[in-house]
């Protein structure tokens, strides 16, 4: 049973179309169709049925993908990593993630890539945009605070962030001394990532606080801008610990203790499974995982 036939099968199974699989593999559509046909001949049964919007897998395809998909990914990643160690790496690695995470948590560790001769191109975006960049082949690796549901993607954890309630010293003192923290938070202005307030909602849900009916005084899709607004006294906010650590140390922000618990978010490195066939991508993934997981452990 040809490994190339199996790889084509896995790509069609994950992407749902011959054309997307061919694009991911760098093959022609007829070549991928031939691989699927050869595999079906060997098995004596159909793996897919053609639908108006792509290929629908049979039960046999479901079973085969479950048995060989992840193992094939691991084998190809191992071979690519070994190849990367034996050749001089060149080329570009495209990496994406939220702007503030990339700037303050990821960028300091990218030296493990440029020191071996790889060029780096960074892009920024939110969760849905990041997943689409990966699936479209515009980036090789992405950092997210969520786990992907698409079967073409894989991920590993690289660390956590603690969500802290912070404010400028005068405002933080008012909140700390308030008899009713919930009421004080509702009455005082706050700054948020957007009007949906994802970080604030996570913190408030963990501490049984309802901010319904309130709106942020300032919104900005970069928490570094919110940090500056909070330091200037625009209002309280909820921020990841790695983004406000220096401000807390300098005293320009102060933390207000959570009444119940301080929630945490997990960070992930995400990639398209088939991309690990490329030595530079497999190498970059391995090096970034080691650097960022090691930094978190330290």
Image (cartoon, grey):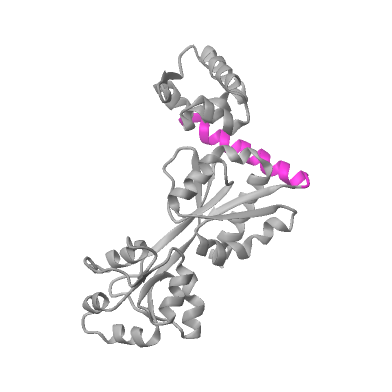
Q: Is residue 82 left or right of residue 290?
A: right
Could you tell me how many numbered marks the image carries? 0
Residue 188 lies, in percent from the top left, at: 28, 79
Residue 56 lies, in percent from the top left, at: 41, 23
- Residue 241 visible here: no
Up-down: is 107 above or below 247? above
Q: Quadrant of the C terminus?
A: bottom right
Residue 104 lies, in percent from the top left, at: 55, 67
Up-down: is 60 above or below 136? above
Q: Is residue 176 left or right of residue 146?
A: left
Q: Nearer the viewer, residue 150 or 297?
A: 150
Point out the stretch of residues depicted in magenta: 66-88
Up-down: is 122 above or below 20? below
Name the residue located 49 percent from the left edge and 55 percent from the top edge.
Answer: 125
Q: Is residue 202 magenta?
A: no
Name the residue located 54 percent from the left edge and 17 percent from the top edge.
Answer: 39
Q: Magenta part mainly helix, strand or loop?
A: helix
- Residue 123 visible here: yes
Residue 294 lies, in percent from the top left, at: 58, 62
Q: Quadrant of the N terminus?
A: top right
Quarter of the rendering containing residue 83: top right
Q: Nearer the viewer, residue 80 or 278?
A: 278
Q: Is residue 76 magenta?
A: yes
Q: Nearer the viewer, residue 170 or 148?
A: 170
Q: Is residue 84 left or right of residue 161?
A: right
Name the residue located 66 percent from the left edge and 40 percent from the top edge.
Answer: 278
């Amino acid at each position: 049973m040809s490994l190339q036939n199996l790889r084509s099968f896995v790509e069609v199974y994950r992407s749902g179309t011959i054309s997307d699989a061919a694009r991911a593999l760098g093959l022609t559509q007829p070549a991928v169709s031939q691989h699927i046909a050869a595999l079906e001949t060997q098995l004596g049964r159909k793996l897919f049925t053609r639908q108006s919007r792509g290929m629908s897998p049979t039960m046999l395809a479901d079973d085969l993908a479950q048995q060989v998909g992840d193992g094939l990914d691991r084998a190809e990643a191992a071979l690519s990593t070994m190849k990367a160690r034996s050749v001089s790496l060149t080329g570009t690695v495209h990496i994406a993630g939220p702007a503030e995470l990339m700037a303050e948590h990821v960028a300091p560790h990218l030296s493990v890539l440029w020191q071996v001769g790889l060029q780096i191109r960074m892009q920024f975006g939110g969760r849905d945009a990041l997943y689409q960049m990966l699936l479209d082949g515009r980036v090789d690796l992405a950092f997210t605070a969520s786990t992907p549901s698409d079967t073409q993607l894989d991920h590993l954890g690289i660390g956590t962030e603690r969500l802290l309630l912070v404010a400028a010293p005068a405002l933080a003192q008012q909140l700390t001394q308030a008899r009713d923290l919930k009421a004080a938070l509702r009455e005082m202005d706050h700054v948020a990532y957007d009007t949906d307030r994802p970080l604030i909602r996570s913190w408030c849900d963990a501490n049984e606080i309802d901010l319904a009916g309130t709106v942020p005084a300032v919104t900005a899709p970069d928490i570094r801008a919110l940090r500056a607004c909070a330091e200037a006294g625009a209002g309280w906010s909820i921020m990841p610990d790695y983004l406000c650590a220096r401000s807390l140390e300098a005293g320009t922000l102060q933390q207000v203790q959570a009444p119940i618990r301080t929630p945490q978010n997990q960070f992930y490195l995400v990639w398209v499974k088939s991309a690990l066939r490329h030595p530079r991508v497999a190498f970059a993934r391995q090096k970034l995982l080691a650097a960022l997981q090691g930094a978190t452990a330290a």
